[in-house]
């Protein structure tokens, strides 16, 4: 059994590395596209089937965003991006419980030892993905902040020379903005990677009924982590739009 913090590279395409976590990301995108097309192919005034499920989830998620922003119009403006983050993270998180993810692969010799290199790995268990998503989220927050209250006022949150105390508080605010990158990326990565390792160990030690409670727990953790990532993005966006 090979437990690696780094996503394993399976090949390359014109110099671009193809990793096992990237393959899962492509699969999640394909599933999302198919589900979206199925839900919107024949929209009816009285929803049924897949459309009913999607409308319930979307309406509930939009209601949460509306409570944070305090305005439905503002919530609708940011909903497409934040909801995309939520659903994509949710799907790649849940990918870790699929049969074969982390357990089916090819054997390679490393330093005289035969190790299994899995063909599939949850995308959220790759720090490159979580860090990239964190950069997108935090960058959006900064852009929204500047666009909402103006460049001078927004920068004034971090560089305030009106008094020594305000200057010190501004520096703390600047550090907190950088810390958001670390918090976003490592929270998601740590929880999903730890869950993936736990499931792998349980499959090896007791491959039958014992892992079932852990599978249910990982489904719940995957949902919570996707929701927390999306909700924090909304909360930080709302904070950036406020002068104080």
Image (cartoon, rainbow, N blue to C red):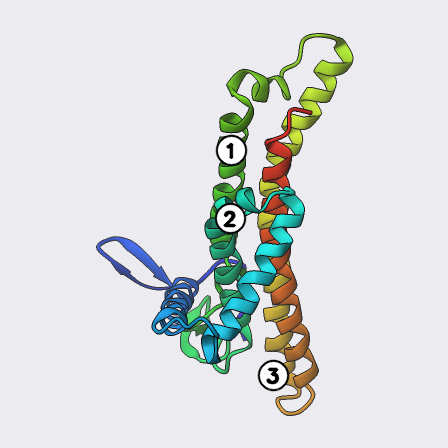
Residue at 57% in and 49% down: 185
The residue furthest top is: 162
Q: Residues within 10 Å of mark 3 (few under 14, many from 20)?
A: few
Question: In this figure, which residue is indicated by the disc labeled 1?
Answer: 144
**Residue on which the image places disc 3:** 204
Q: Position of residue 229 (x, y in %)?
A: 60, 52
Secondary structure state at the residue bearing disc 2: helix
17 vs 161, left or right, is left
Q: Can I make out residue 180 in this image?
A: yes
Residue drawn at 61 percent across, 66 percent down: 222
Q: Which mark is first along the chain, 3 or 1?
A: 1
**Is residue 123 toward the left or the right of residue 61 in the image?**
left
Instruction: Give residue 214's quadrant in the image.
Output: bottom right
**Quadrant in the picture for the C terminus:** top right
* Residue on which disc 2 sits: 76
Query: Which of 173 and 236 lies nearest the eye of the viewer?
Result: 236
Query: Where 84 falls versus 51 (above or below)?
Result: above
Question: How far apart are the alpha carbons under marks 1 and 3?
Answer: 48 Å
Q: Residue furthest bottom?
A: 208
Identity of the residue drawn at 66% across and 46% down: 68
- Horizontal arrangement in the rendering, residue 239 relative to residue 79 (left or right): right
Pointer 1: residues within 10 angstroms few (<14), some, or many (20+)?
A: some
In the foreground, 215 or 72 = 72
- Say which label, 2 or 3, has the lower sequence index: 2
Relative to residue 238, is residue 203 depicted above or below? below
């Amino acid at each position: 059994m090979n437990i690696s913090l780094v996503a394993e590279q399976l090949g390359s395409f014109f110099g671009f590395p193809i990793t096992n976590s990237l393959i899962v990301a492509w699969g999640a995108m394909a599933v999302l596209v198919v589900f979206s097309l199925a839900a919107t192919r024949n929209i009816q005034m009285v929803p049924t089937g897949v459309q009913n499920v999607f409308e319930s989830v979307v309406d509930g998620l939009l209601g949460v965003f509306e409570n944070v922003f305090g305005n439905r119009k503002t919530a609708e403006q940011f909903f497409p991006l934040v909801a995309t983050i939520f659903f994509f993270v949710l799907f790649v998180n849940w990918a870790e419980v699929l049969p074969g993810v982390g357990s089916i692969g090819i054997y390679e010799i490393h330093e005289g030892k035969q190790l299994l290199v899995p063909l599939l790995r949850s995308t959220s268990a790759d720090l490159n993905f979580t860090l990239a998503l964190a950069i997108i989220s935090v960058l959006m927050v900064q852009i929204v902040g500047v666009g909402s209250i103006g460049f001078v006022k927004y920068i004034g949150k971090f560089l305030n020379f009106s008094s020594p105390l305000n200057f010190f508080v501004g520096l703390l605010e600047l550090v907190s903005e950088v810390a958001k990158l670390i918090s976003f990326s490592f929270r998601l990565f740590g929880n999903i990677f730890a869950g993936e390792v736990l499931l792998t160990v349980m499959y090896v030690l007791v491959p039958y009924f014992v892992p079932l409670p852990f599978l249910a727990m990982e489904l719940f953790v995957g949902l919570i982590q996707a929701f927390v990532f999306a909700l924090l993005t909304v909360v930080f966006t709302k904070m950036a739009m406020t002068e104080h």
